[in-house]
Amino acid sequence: MKMSANPFQACLDTILSPTVAFDTIKEKKGWSWLPFVLLTSSTFVLFLYYFNVVDFAWLKETMLNQAAASKPMTDDELKAIGSFYEKDTMLWTTAIGGTIGFIVINTLTAIYYHIATKVSASSEYKFTQWFAFTWWASFPAFVSVLLSALVIFFSSDGMVSMQDLQPTSLNSLLFSVEPSNAWYSFLEAINLFTFWMIAVTSIGLGSWLNIDSKKSLIIAAAPQIFIFGGWALFLLFTA
């Protein structure tokens, strides 16, 4: 059986040959430090890079216009929002918040895997092992970060919105709805990497639990279906 030679090779295999990667890391549980470091540090550095390149005056005006378009606001309300849109404040809250948010999401996901696999597949893996698993399953996000960095790099005028950092979102690829549209955030939240990570997770679950692909796909996709399905239903009845 082919195995990844080291943690760096395992990261690459997660993208190119996930079965090989997960067959390996099932036995090499101490390797998960690498995807954790790469994903959290790259997320942090991406936002530092973004706020040091973007034309912040343009960004602030764009965000205020979007806020005003989303719901009616008085001048005082817009002024209050504008006071938060300061470069240093946004830089650190976005960089730190994005990084911590990643950790929180993977922690919750690990709890879900720990419970769901114990019930449906009699898994004996511990929570800490599932937490390590989430960083491998999330590794396609590293490609997303690199893609976002390229968007910033090739911007000649610094006029790059936060939404531009997600060129593979459903909104960017298919719908192009305006920020004032009730479905805007929903369509921005789903991107090609969402489906890629579900596929990688499904392969990983199949490798770790020796279950069929249908069952592993259901376990992998269930959180996304629940979140985005509930969100879509909410929008259908309230928008």
Image (tube, rainbow, N blue to C red):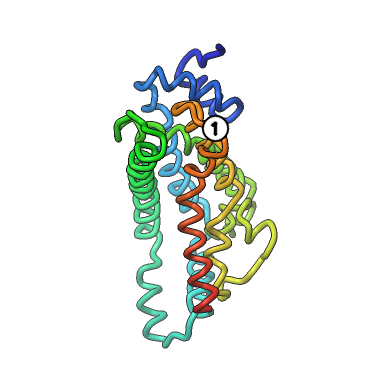
Q: Residue at x 64, y 47 (%)?
A: 154
Q: Residue at x 57, y 39 (%)?
A: 214
Task: Check the image and report above or below for 158 versus 72.
Answer: above
The N terminus, quarter of image:
top right
Secondary structure under tag 1 reads loop
Q: Residue at x 55, y 43 (%)?
A: 144
> Which picture quadrant has residue 181?
bottom right
Judged left or right of residue 45, residue 197 is right
Q: Where is residue 158 drawn, in percent x and y? A: 58, 56
Amino acid beneath label 1: Asp
Q: Where is residue 6 drawn, in percent x and y? A: 46, 15
Q: Nearer the viewer, residue 217 or 15?
A: 217
Q: Where is residue 91 drawn, in percent x and y? A: 39, 54
Report the number of discs: 1
Q: Nearer the viewer, residue 48 or 171?
A: 171
Q: Residue at x 48, y 68 (%)?
A: 60
Q: Where is residue 84 drawn, in percent x and y? A: 36, 68
Q: Mark 1 sits on what residue?
A: 212
Q: Nearer the viewer, residue 75 or 172?
A: 172
> Which picture quadrant has residue 17?
top right
For disc 1, the neighbor class at 10 Å (few under 14, some 14 to 19, many from 20) is: few
